[in-house]
Image (cartoon, rainbow, N blue to C red):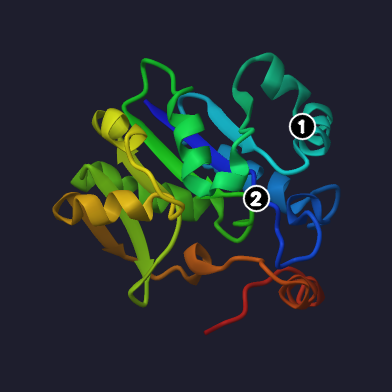
Amino acid sequence: MLTGVILAAGEAERMGELKQLLEWGKNNTILSQSINNLLDSKIVAGQLLIITGAESERIENYLKNKYTEELTSAKIKIIKNPDYKNGMMSSVKKALLNVDSNTRYILFTLADKPFITAEIYQNIYKVFLQKKPDIFVPEYKKQKGHPVILKRTLLKKSLKISGRGGLRNLFKLMPHRVYHFHCPYPQIRTDIDYKEEYQRYKRREFKLRKE
């Protein structure tokens, strides 16, 4: 069973405002589009954990209104990370501590990944199931992206990792256990960090710029 994790705790300092809740299409935000794409992929058999931090109350209120049914059924679970200022690894650990006991695989992605479609998630997960490595990292033009998938067997070791580099610390610790999937999807690398990027994507009706 796969548990999904969306890391949505960041302060979005480069954006200058909370990017998770910026408008993204009709009745959507950057965060909700990222959530919808992952849910629509149907690969998350367990829960989808949303890790909040900066402006957590605002994000949680939005999610409670937007995903009332999913939260009531426990398909989605919101987890607050009070230590989010300590870096992404603190949110990763918060997620790992809340993974269901039946989980075999854990998928991590970011809140600002609305370009990763349901189909891309499905295709990436299909390759993961074929290879079943301990750590699965997709790459586009030799640049690492998301989603990252871990086997549950690495949970305890991951909880012992320190530092602010997120899961990159785990990759460095055991490079021999990482499978690098060279994929054709620039979407896995596309973040929305700056206001100019956000406005450009909006003007193009959210279509990814060709590289």
Question: Which type of secondary structure does the marked residue at label 1 adopt?
Answer: helix
Q: Is residue 28 above or below residue 15?
A: above
Inter-mark Cα distance, 2 to 1: 14 Å
Q: Which residue is mark 2?
A: 10
Of the pair 35 and 100, the residue shown nearer to us: 100
The three-letter code of the residue at mark 2 reads Gly
Task: Return the x and y of residue 49 as percentages of the image width and height.
Answer: 56, 31
Note whether residue 57 is visible: yes
Note whether residue 40 is visible: no
Q: Is residue 102 above or below residue 156?
A: above
Residue found 28% across the figure and 61% down from its top: 181
Q: Which residue is mark 1?
A: 60
The three-letter code of the residue at mark 1 reads Glu
> Seen in the image, is 70 located left or right of residue 27?
left
| Circle 2 Cα neighbour tier, 10 Å, few/some/many (<14 / 14–19 / ≥20) | many
Task: Return the x and y of residue 9 as percentages of the image width and height.
Answer: 64, 44
> Seen in the image, is 126 located left or right of residue 56?
left
